Image: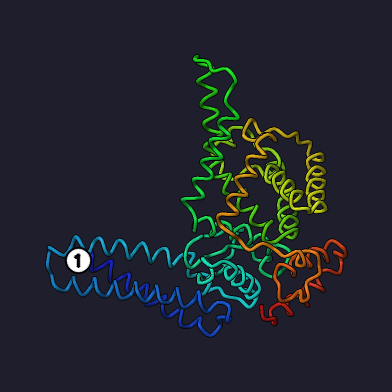
Amino acid sequence: MQELLKQNNTALRHEIEQLRRSLTDAQGNIPDEFHAYTERITDECDILYQRVLRNLEYLEFGLESLLKDILSETELVTRAFYDLNGQRVSPILRVRDSDRLSLKFLLWLHATHPQAKNIPAAICDGEFGVWPIQPTLYATPCTSQKGLLNLPIFFHEFGHLLYTFHQSEMNDLINELQAEIRDLLRPPVERNDQFAQTQEKSRNVIVDTWYEWAQECFCDAVGLVMGGSSFAYTFSMYFRVLGWNEYHVPREKLVHRSHPVTWIRIHLLVNRAQRMGYNAAAINLEEKWSQVAAALGVMEDYYGFYDSKFLPMIQTKLDDMITETSPREFRESEVSNQEDSTFTSPVALLNAAWQKFQDDPENYREWEEDAIVRFLDADI
Protein backbone atom coordinates (compact mmCIF):
# COMPACT_ATOMS: atom_id res chain seq x y z
CA MET A 1 0.00 0.00 0.00
CA GLN A 2 2.86 2.38 0.82
CA GLU A 3 4.40 2.04 -2.66
CA LEU A 4 1.00 2.16 -4.38
CA LEU A 5 0.10 5.45 -2.71
CA LYS A 6 3.50 6.90 -3.50
CA GLN A 7 3.08 6.05 -7.18
CA ASN A 8 -0.36 7.61 -7.38
CA ASN A 9 0.59 10.78 -5.56
CA THR A 10 3.80 11.18 -7.54
CA ALA A 11 1.91 10.84 -10.81
CA LEU A 12 -0.75 13.24 -9.55
CA ARG A 13 1.91 15.76 -8.53
CA HIS A 14 3.35 15.62 -12.04
CA GLU A 15 -0.06 16.18 -13.66
CA ILE A 16 -0.86 19.11 -11.40
CA GLU A 17 2.53 20.65 -12.14
CA GLN A 18 1.77 20.36 -15.85
CA LEU A 19 -1.60 22.00 -15.36
CA ARG A 20 -0.12 24.82 -13.29
CA ARG A 21 2.39 25.54 -16.05
CA SER A 22 -0.40 25.54 -18.64
CA LEU A 23 -2.43 27.97 -16.55
CA THR A 24 0.58 30.24 -16.17
CA ASP A 25 1.22 30.17 -19.93
CA ALA A 26 -2.42 31.09 -20.59
CA GLN A 27 -2.38 34.16 -18.36
CA GLY A 28 -1.27 36.50 -21.12
CA ASN A 29 -4.34 35.72 -23.24
CA ILE A 30 -6.98 36.05 -20.54
CA PRO A 31 -9.49 38.89 -21.13
CA ASP A 32 -10.44 41.11 -18.21
CA GLU A 33 -13.88 39.50 -18.03
CA PHE A 34 -12.23 36.15 -17.31
CA HIS A 35 -9.81 37.07 -14.52
CA ALA A 36 -12.08 36.16 -11.61
CA TYR A 37 -12.77 32.68 -12.95
CA THR A 38 -9.10 32.09 -13.79
CA GLU A 39 -7.97 33.17 -10.33
CA ARG A 40 -10.48 30.85 -8.66
CA ILE A 41 -9.43 27.84 -10.73
CA THR A 42 -5.73 28.61 -10.24
CA ASP A 43 -6.25 28.81 -6.48
CA GLU A 44 -8.04 25.45 -6.49
CA CYS A 45 -5.17 23.93 -8.46
CA ASP A 46 -2.63 25.29 -5.97
CA ILE A 47 -4.60 23.88 -3.04
CA LEU A 48 -4.71 20.42 -4.64
CA TYR A 49 -0.97 20.61 -5.25
CA GLN A 50 -0.30 21.33 -1.59
CA ARG A 51 -2.52 18.43 -0.55
CA VAL A 52 -0.55 16.03 -2.77
CA LEU A 53 2.75 17.30 -1.36
CA ARG A 54 1.38 16.72 2.13
CA ASN A 55 0.43 13.14 1.21
CA LEU A 56 3.95 12.48 -0.06
CA GLU A 57 5.39 14.02 3.09
CA TYR A 58 3.28 11.77 5.32
CA LEU A 59 4.26 8.73 3.27
CA GLU A 60 7.91 9.45 4.04
CA PHE A 61 7.15 8.77 7.71
CA GLY A 62 6.63 5.10 6.79
CA LEU A 63 3.87 4.64 9.38
CA GLU A 64 1.28 2.00 8.52
CA SER A 65 -1.21 3.67 10.85
CA LEU A 66 -1.35 6.66 8.47
CA LEU A 67 -2.01 4.70 5.29
CA LYS A 68 -5.79 4.51 5.59
CA ASP A 69 -6.08 8.28 6.01
CA ILE A 70 -3.62 8.92 3.18
CA LEU A 71 -5.62 6.58 0.92
CA SER A 72 -8.80 8.51 1.70
CA GLU A 73 -7.12 11.86 1.05
CA THR A 74 -5.57 10.56 -2.17
CA GLU A 75 -9.00 9.51 -3.40
CA LEU A 76 -10.49 12.93 -2.60
CA VAL A 77 -7.65 14.84 -4.25
CA THR A 78 -7.70 12.61 -7.33
CA ARG A 79 -11.44 13.04 -7.81
CA ALA A 80 -11.16 16.79 -7.33
CA PHE A 81 -8.31 16.99 -9.83
CA TYR A 82 -10.16 14.92 -12.44
CA ASP A 83 -13.10 17.29 -12.08
CA LEU A 84 -10.87 20.36 -12.34
CA ASN A 85 -8.80 18.95 -15.20
CA GLY A 86 -11.89 18.13 -17.26
CA GLN A 87 -14.51 20.71 -18.10
CA ARG A 88 -13.61 23.32 -15.50
CA VAL A 89 -10.10 24.21 -16.64
CA SER A 90 -10.76 23.91 -20.37
CA PRO A 91 -12.34 27.40 -20.71
CA ILE A 92 -9.03 28.93 -19.65
CA LEU A 93 -6.85 26.82 -21.91
CA ARG A 94 -9.13 27.33 -24.95
CA VAL A 95 -9.74 31.05 -24.37
CA ARG A 96 -10.48 33.13 -27.47
CA ASP A 97 -11.06 36.82 -28.12
CA SER A 98 -14.65 36.03 -29.09
CA ASP A 99 -15.31 34.80 -25.52
CA ARG A 100 -15.56 38.40 -24.35
CA LEU A 101 -19.13 38.78 -25.58
CA SER A 102 -20.52 35.82 -23.64
CA LEU A 103 -18.33 36.51 -20.61
CA LYS A 104 -19.37 40.14 -20.34
CA PHE A 105 -23.01 39.14 -20.60
CA LEU A 106 -22.63 36.40 -17.98
CA LEU A 107 -20.79 38.69 -15.56
CA TRP A 108 -23.62 41.18 -15.87
CA LEU A 109 -26.15 38.37 -15.45
CA HIS A 110 -24.53 37.17 -12.23
CA ALA A 111 -24.26 40.74 -10.96
CA THR A 112 -28.05 41.14 -11.20
CA HIS A 113 -28.62 38.74 -8.30
CA PRO A 114 -27.24 39.13 -4.76
CA GLN A 115 -26.51 35.42 -4.38
CA ALA A 116 -24.73 35.13 -7.73
CA LYS A 117 -22.86 38.43 -7.92
CA ASN A 118 -19.62 37.08 -6.46
CA ILE A 119 -19.63 33.81 -8.39
CA PRO A 120 -17.24 33.81 -11.37
CA ALA A 121 -18.54 32.44 -14.67
CA ALA A 122 -16.91 30.84 -17.69
CA ILE A 123 -17.94 29.32 -21.00
CA CYS A 124 -16.97 26.13 -22.77
CA ASP A 125 -17.88 24.72 -26.17
CA GLY A 126 -20.92 22.48 -26.45
CA GLU A 127 -24.69 22.42 -26.57
CA PHE A 128 -26.31 25.01 -24.30
CA GLY A 129 -26.12 23.88 -20.70
CA VAL A 130 -24.83 24.83 -17.27
CA TRP A 131 -22.95 23.30 -14.38
CA PRO A 132 -24.57 25.26 -11.53
CA ILE A 133 -21.52 25.08 -9.30
CA GLN A 134 -19.10 27.70 -8.04
CA PRO A 135 -17.44 28.93 -10.24
CA THR A 136 -20.25 28.40 -12.74
CA LEU A 137 -19.55 26.91 -16.14
CA TYR A 138 -21.85 27.57 -19.09
CA ALA A 139 -21.70 25.55 -22.31
CA THR A 140 -22.56 27.27 -25.56
CA PRO A 141 -22.22 26.31 -29.24
CA CYS A 142 -19.16 27.77 -30.94
CA THR A 143 -20.94 30.15 -33.32
CA SER A 144 -23.38 31.28 -30.62
CA GLN A 145 -20.39 32.72 -28.76
CA LYS A 146 -19.91 35.25 -31.55
CA GLY A 147 -23.43 36.64 -31.97
CA LEU A 148 -26.36 38.14 -30.09
CA LEU A 149 -29.37 36.15 -31.22
CA ASN A 150 -28.74 33.06 -29.09
CA LEU A 151 -27.43 34.81 -25.98
CA PRO A 152 -30.90 34.91 -24.34
CA ILE A 153 -30.66 31.13 -23.81
CA PHE A 154 -28.28 32.01 -20.96
CA PHE A 155 -31.26 33.42 -19.05
CA HIS A 156 -32.70 29.89 -18.94
CA GLU A 157 -29.39 28.38 -17.84
CA PHE A 158 -29.05 31.04 -15.14
CA GLY A 159 -32.38 29.82 -13.82
CA HIS A 160 -30.74 26.51 -12.91
CA LEU A 161 -28.21 28.39 -10.77
CA LEU A 162 -31.00 30.35 -9.07
CA TYR A 163 -32.73 27.07 -8.32
CA THR A 164 -29.73 25.84 -6.33
CA PHE A 165 -29.84 28.90 -4.07
CA HIS A 166 -33.35 27.98 -2.90
CA GLN A 167 -33.37 24.25 -3.56
CA SER A 168 -35.32 23.19 -0.48
CA GLU A 169 -38.08 25.76 -0.99
CA MET A 170 -38.20 25.11 -4.73
CA ASN A 171 -38.48 21.37 -4.20
CA ASP A 172 -41.37 21.98 -1.81
CA LEU A 173 -43.18 24.04 -4.45
CA ILE A 174 -42.65 21.36 -7.07
CA ASN A 175 -43.93 18.73 -4.65
CA GLU A 176 -47.06 20.83 -4.21
CA LEU A 177 -47.48 20.98 -7.98
CA GLN A 178 -47.04 17.22 -8.22
CA ALA A 179 -49.74 16.73 -5.60
CA GLU A 180 -52.11 18.96 -7.54
CA ILE A 181 -51.42 17.08 -10.77
CA ARG A 182 -52.01 13.79 -8.96
CA ASP A 183 -55.38 15.06 -7.70
CA LEU A 184 -56.32 16.18 -11.19
CA LEU A 185 -55.49 12.77 -12.64
CA ARG A 186 -57.33 10.82 -9.96
CA PRO A 187 -60.49 9.14 -11.33
CA PRO A 188 -63.85 10.25 -9.92
CA VAL A 189 -64.56 6.70 -8.76
CA GLU A 190 -61.88 4.65 -7.03
CA ARG A 191 -61.72 0.98 -7.99
CA ASN A 192 -59.70 -1.88 -6.58
CA ASP A 193 -58.86 -4.14 -9.49
CA GLN A 194 -55.98 -4.85 -11.84
CA PHE A 195 -56.96 -2.06 -14.22
CA ALA A 196 -57.07 0.47 -11.39
CA GLN A 197 -53.62 -0.59 -10.20
CA THR A 198 -52.23 -0.19 -13.71
CA GLN A 199 -53.75 3.27 -13.98
CA GLU A 200 -52.33 4.22 -10.60
CA LYS A 201 -48.84 3.22 -11.72
CA SER A 202 -49.29 5.30 -14.87
CA ARG A 203 -50.37 8.32 -12.80
CA ASN A 204 -47.35 7.90 -10.53
CA VAL A 205 -45.01 7.95 -13.52
CA ILE A 206 -46.58 11.17 -14.80
CA VAL A 207 -46.37 12.83 -11.40
CA ASP A 208 -42.75 11.74 -10.88
CA THR A 209 -41.77 12.99 -14.34
CA TRP A 210 -43.04 16.46 -13.54
CA TYR A 211 -40.34 16.88 -10.88
CA GLU A 212 -37.71 17.55 -13.54
CA TRP A 213 -40.13 19.06 -16.03
CA ALA A 214 -41.15 21.74 -13.55
CA GLN A 215 -37.52 22.77 -13.14
CA GLU A 216 -37.12 23.26 -16.88
CA CYS A 217 -40.39 25.19 -17.09
CA PHE A 218 -39.22 27.39 -14.23
CA CYS A 219 -36.00 28.18 -16.10
CA ASP A 220 -38.04 29.05 -19.20
CA ALA A 221 -40.11 31.41 -17.07
CA VAL A 222 -36.91 33.00 -15.76
CA GLY A 223 -35.84 33.50 -19.36
CA LEU A 224 -39.02 35.36 -20.21
CA VAL A 225 -39.06 37.41 -17.02
CA MET A 226 -35.44 38.50 -17.45
CA GLY A 227 -35.10 38.71 -21.22
CA GLY A 228 -38.59 39.53 -22.41
CA SER A 229 -39.45 38.84 -26.03
CA SER A 230 -35.80 38.21 -26.93
CA PHE A 231 -35.89 34.97 -24.94
CA ALA A 232 -39.17 33.87 -26.51
CA TYR A 233 -37.87 34.44 -30.04
CA THR A 234 -34.52 32.78 -29.34
CA PHE A 235 -36.07 29.72 -27.73
CA SER A 236 -38.59 29.35 -30.54
CA MET A 237 -36.15 29.63 -33.44
CA TYR A 238 -33.51 27.44 -31.81
CA PHE A 239 -35.85 24.45 -31.50
CA ARG A 240 -38.68 24.80 -34.00
CA VAL A 241 -37.00 23.14 -37.00
CA LEU A 242 -35.19 20.35 -35.14
CA GLY A 243 -37.78 17.84 -36.23
CA TRP A 244 -40.62 15.67 -35.07
CA ASN A 245 -39.31 15.03 -31.54
CA GLU A 246 -39.68 18.69 -30.60
CA TYR A 247 -43.42 18.31 -31.19
CA HIS A 248 -44.21 14.72 -30.34
CA VAL A 249 -42.50 12.03 -28.27
CA PRO A 250 -43.78 8.45 -27.96
CA ARG A 251 -45.27 7.61 -24.59
CA GLU A 252 -42.53 5.16 -23.62
CA LYS A 253 -39.90 7.87 -24.15
CA LEU A 254 -41.81 10.42 -22.08
CA VAL A 255 -41.39 8.28 -18.97
CA HIS A 256 -38.88 10.01 -16.67
CA ARG A 257 -37.71 12.19 -19.57
CA SER A 258 -35.63 15.09 -18.20
CA HIS A 259 -37.22 17.78 -20.39
CA PRO A 260 -40.84 18.29 -21.40
CA VAL A 261 -41.70 17.99 -25.08
CA THR A 262 -40.65 21.37 -26.46
CA TRP A 263 -44.15 22.10 -27.75
CA ILE A 264 -45.41 21.90 -24.15
CA ARG A 265 -42.81 24.48 -23.17
CA ILE A 266 -43.95 26.69 -26.04
CA HIS A 267 -47.54 26.51 -24.77
CA LEU A 268 -46.37 27.67 -21.35
CA LEU A 269 -44.26 30.48 -22.81
CA VAL A 270 -47.14 31.64 -25.02
CA ASN A 271 -49.48 31.72 -22.06
CA ARG A 272 -46.98 33.57 -19.87
CA ALA A 273 -46.23 36.10 -22.61
CA GLN A 274 -49.96 36.74 -22.99
CA ARG A 275 -50.33 37.22 -19.25
CA MET A 276 -47.45 39.71 -19.33
CA GLY A 277 -49.10 41.64 -22.16
CA TYR A 278 -46.69 40.64 -24.93
CA ASN A 279 -49.23 39.38 -27.40
CA ALA A 280 -47.06 39.91 -30.49
CA ALA A 281 -44.43 37.49 -29.19
CA ALA A 282 -47.12 35.03 -28.09
CA ILE A 283 -48.79 35.08 -31.50
CA ASN A 284 -45.42 34.72 -33.24
CA LEU A 285 -44.54 31.58 -31.27
CA GLU A 286 -47.97 30.02 -31.62
CA GLU A 287 -48.19 30.62 -35.36
CA LYS A 288 -44.64 29.49 -36.17
CA TRP A 289 -44.90 26.26 -34.19
CA SER A 290 -48.32 25.49 -35.63
CA GLN A 291 -46.96 25.99 -39.15
CA VAL A 292 -44.10 23.55 -38.64
CA ALA A 293 -46.33 21.04 -36.87
CA ALA A 294 -48.78 21.14 -39.78
CA ALA A 295 -45.96 20.65 -42.27
CA LEU A 296 -44.72 17.64 -40.29
CA GLY A 297 -48.22 16.25 -39.91
CA VAL A 298 -47.94 16.19 -36.13
CA MET A 299 -51.02 15.84 -33.97
CA GLU A 300 -50.66 16.88 -30.34
CA ASP A 301 -50.74 13.95 -27.96
CA TYR A 302 -48.90 13.91 -24.66
CA TYR A 303 -50.44 10.65 -23.39
CA GLY A 304 -51.66 12.22 -20.17
CA PHE A 305 -48.31 13.79 -19.28
CA TYR A 306 -49.72 17.21 -20.14
CA ASP A 307 -53.17 18.63 -20.67
CA SER A 308 -54.34 22.22 -21.02
CA LYS A 309 -56.11 21.83 -17.68
CA PHE A 310 -52.65 21.55 -16.07
CA LEU A 311 -51.79 25.05 -17.27
CA PRO A 312 -53.27 27.23 -14.48
CA MET A 313 -51.71 25.21 -11.67
CA ILE A 314 -48.33 25.05 -13.41
CA GLN A 315 -48.24 28.79 -13.99
CA THR A 316 -49.29 29.52 -10.42
CA LYS A 317 -46.45 27.40 -9.06
CA LEU A 318 -43.98 28.93 -11.52
CA ASP A 319 -45.08 32.37 -10.28
CA ASP A 320 -44.32 31.24 -6.73
CA MET A 321 -40.91 29.95 -7.81
CA ILE A 322 -40.12 33.25 -9.52
CA THR A 323 -41.10 35.08 -6.33
CA GLU A 324 -38.90 32.77 -4.27
CA THR A 325 -35.78 33.25 -6.41
CA SER A 326 -36.30 36.92 -7.38
CA PRO A 327 -34.55 37.15 -10.76
CA ARG A 328 -34.09 40.65 -12.17
CA GLU A 329 -37.16 41.55 -14.21
CA PHE A 330 -36.76 43.48 -17.44
CA ARG A 331 -37.81 47.11 -17.64
CA GLU A 332 -40.46 48.03 -20.16
CA SER A 333 -38.07 50.44 -21.84
CA GLU A 334 -35.59 47.60 -22.40
CA VAL A 335 -37.99 45.51 -24.45
CA SER A 336 -39.70 48.30 -26.38
CA ASN A 337 -36.60 49.97 -27.88
CA GLN A 338 -37.04 52.99 -25.61
CA GLU A 339 -33.86 52.53 -23.58
CA ASP A 340 -31.63 55.61 -23.60
CA SER A 341 -28.55 53.53 -24.29
CA THR A 342 -29.06 50.15 -25.90
CA PHE A 343 -25.42 49.24 -25.41
CA THR A 344 -25.31 49.63 -21.63
CA SER A 345 -28.32 47.37 -21.08
CA PRO A 346 -27.81 43.77 -22.24
CA VAL A 347 -31.57 43.18 -22.17
CA ALA A 348 -32.20 46.21 -24.38
CA LEU A 349 -29.41 45.11 -26.72
CA LEU A 350 -30.81 41.59 -27.15
CA ASN A 351 -34.34 42.83 -27.75
CA ALA A 352 -33.05 45.41 -30.22
CA ALA A 353 -31.10 42.66 -31.99
CA TRP A 354 -34.20 40.55 -32.44
CA GLN A 355 -36.20 43.52 -33.64
CA LYS A 356 -33.49 44.33 -36.18
CA PHE A 357 -33.24 40.71 -37.33
CA GLN A 358 -36.98 40.41 -37.83
CA ASP A 359 -37.20 43.75 -39.65
CA ASP A 360 -34.17 43.31 -41.90
CA PRO A 361 -32.57 39.85 -41.74
CA GLU A 362 -30.40 40.41 -44.82
CA ASN A 363 -28.57 43.39 -43.31
CA TYR A 364 -28.70 42.21 -39.72
CA ARG A 365 -25.14 40.86 -39.54
CA GLU A 366 -23.57 44.20 -40.36
CA TRP A 367 -25.62 45.85 -37.63
CA GLU A 368 -24.72 43.07 -35.18
CA GLU A 369 -20.97 43.41 -35.71
CA ASP A 370 -21.12 47.11 -34.89
CA ALA A 371 -23.46 46.51 -31.94
CA ILE A 372 -21.10 43.94 -30.39
CA VAL A 373 -18.12 46.30 -30.64
CA ARG A 374 -20.09 49.09 -28.99
CA PHE A 375 -21.39 46.76 -26.27
CA LEU A 376 -17.90 45.50 -25.44
CA ASP A 377 -16.64 49.08 -25.18
CA ALA A 378 -19.53 50.21 -22.97
CA ASP A 379 -19.62 50.32 -19.18
CA ILE A 380 -22.58 48.33 -17.89
Q: Residues within 10 Å of mark 1 (few under 14, many from 20)?
A: few
Relative to 85, residue 239 above or below: above
Residue 89, x across and y down, in percent:
48, 70
Q: Work out whether residue 361 or residue 270 is closer to the camera in this orientation and state it.
A: 270
Q: Is residue 309 left or right of residue 61?
A: right
Q: Work out whether residue 304 or residue 362 is closer to the camera in this orientation and state it.
A: 304
Q: Quadrant of the N terminus?
A: bottom left
Residue at x 78%, y 77% (from the top left corner):
370
Local secondary structure at mark 1: helix
Q: Is residue 370 left or right of residue 18?
A: right
Residue 185, x across and y down, in percent:
59, 28
Q: Which residue is mark 1?
A: 3
Residue at x 75%, y 33% (from the top left corner):
299
Residue 335, x across and y down, in percent:
77, 64
Residue 334, quarter of the rendered image: bottom right
Residue 358, quarter of the rendered image: bottom right
Residue at x 73%, y 46% (from the top left corner):
271
